[in-house]
């Protein structure tokens, strides 16, 4: 005999299951929803470890790893980007392996001078140094290499002297730096920031992942409101075309914050950044893979933006195919989001 009550009960259960599945799907989507990069025109490759500066005349300068610090310019943060040449065509005067293959530039203006920090070393080695060059315009051909800042490391050192980032706070200048070996540190710099103002042994450790391989690097400090935010990249950065890391082990961008420029830093959950804390700001999604090597800049129209390199999976995975990415950054919730 046909049982209508059974049919209605079954239909109700199916409807309930579908509603729950839909809710879970929506919540899952919210949890991993990241905005895709803004459009970019011109030369949007040659963008590994970008550093972005807007000159007083409105021209954007983009510096990147490779080509003895490649320099691109554009009238807008979204382009069109044009290649100008190498910032340091003769390489660095630092007497270390890698002084003709300069990494991870960071450019900052202090009073009327631009300071370009760069890394000298070889992949996977601690025999490293952070160098500096100066210019009053940032134009190709205008940079003077001054050699080492004194932030150097050798095999067996506690730290790895690469990925320098200059930050200003409390009328002082600080350099954030480090990669893998004991992760991220900070040291005070001189007023004209070409040298350390203190011994490297006095450097403050600002972030640390206690478990191997301590894959944390590319520190970038940015103050917004009452907080100093420490952005950094975690995971495997490079050479994806030669071998892919396990899912989730590729580059991603995280952050911690503190009311002091030197910490202690904590993530959104309150976990110490010295105990592996870090709130994920941007990670792989859709066709964006391995975003990292980030920085923050305030655009006059967009406000704070996060810029970085990433792999576009529709194009290719090699380092020379890395794309330049930009996302608007929202601090309205107290933590940055894209």
Image (spheres, grey):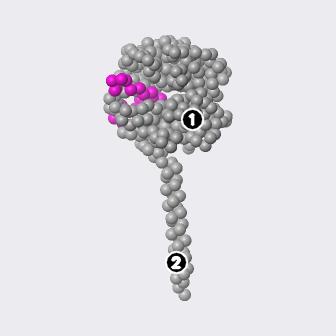
Q: Is residue 311 left or right of residue 209?
A: left
Instruction: Tell me whether the residue at label 1 lies in contact with that at label 2, contact meaning CB atoms closer than 8 angstroms.
Output: no
Q: Residue at x 52, y 79 (%)?
A: 7
x and y, in percent, of residue 314 in the image: 41, 42
Tell me the magenta residue range. 40-59
Residue at disc 1, secondary structure: strand
- Tell me the mark number nearer the camera, choosing from 1 and 2: 1
The magenta stretch spans residue 56: yes
Camera-side residue: 204 or 131? 204
Q: Quadrant of residue 304?
A: top left
Camera-side residue: 208 or 172? 172
Q: Residue at x 59, y 24 (%)?
A: 186
Camera-side residue: 203 or 82? 203
Of the image marks 1 and 2, the number of the one nearer the N terminus: 2
Q: Which residue is mark 1?
A: 257
Q: Quadrant of residue 206?
A: top right
């Amino acid at each position: 005999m046909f049982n209508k009550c059974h049919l209605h009960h079954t239909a109700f259960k199916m409807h309930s299951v579908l509603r729950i599945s839909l809710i879970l799907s929506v919540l899952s989507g919210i949890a991993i929803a990241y905005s895709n990069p803004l459009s970019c025109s011109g030369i949007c490759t040659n963008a590994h470890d970008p550093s972005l500066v807007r000159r007083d005349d409105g021209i954007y300068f983009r510096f990147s790893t490779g080509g003895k610090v490649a320099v691109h310019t554009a009238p807008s943060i979204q382009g069109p980007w044009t290649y100008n040449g190498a910032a340091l065509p003769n390489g660095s005067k630092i007497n270390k392996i890698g002084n003709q293959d300069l990494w991870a530039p960071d450019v900052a203006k202090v009073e009327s001078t631009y300071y370009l920090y760069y890394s000298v070393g070889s992949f996977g080695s601690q025999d490293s140094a952070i160098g500096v060059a100066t210019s009053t315009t940032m134009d190709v051909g205008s940079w003077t290499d001054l050699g080492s800042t004194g932030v150097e490391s050798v095999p067996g050192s506690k730290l790895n002297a690469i990925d320098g980032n200059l930050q200003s706070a409390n009328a002082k200048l600080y350099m954030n730096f480090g990669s893998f070996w004991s992760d991220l540190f900070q040291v005070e710099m001189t007023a004209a920031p070409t040298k350390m103002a203190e011994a490297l042994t006095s450097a403050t450790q600002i972030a640390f992942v206690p478990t191997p391989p301590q894959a944390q690097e590319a520190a970038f400090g940015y103050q917004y409101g009452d907080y100093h935010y420490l952005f950094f990249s975690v995971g495997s950065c490079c050479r994806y075309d030669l071998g892919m890391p396990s899912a989730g082990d590729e580059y991603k961008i995280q952050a911690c914050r503190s009311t002091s420029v030197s910490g202690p830093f904590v993530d959104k959950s309150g976990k110490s950044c010295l105990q592996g804390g870090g709130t994920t700001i941007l990670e792989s999604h859709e066709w964006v893979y391995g975003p990292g090597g980030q920085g923050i800049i305030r655009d006059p129209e967009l406000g704070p933006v996060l810029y970085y390199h990433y792999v576009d999976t529709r194009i290719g995975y090699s380092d020379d195919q890395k794309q330049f990415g930009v996302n608007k950054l929202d601090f309205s919730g107290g933590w940055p989001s894209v």
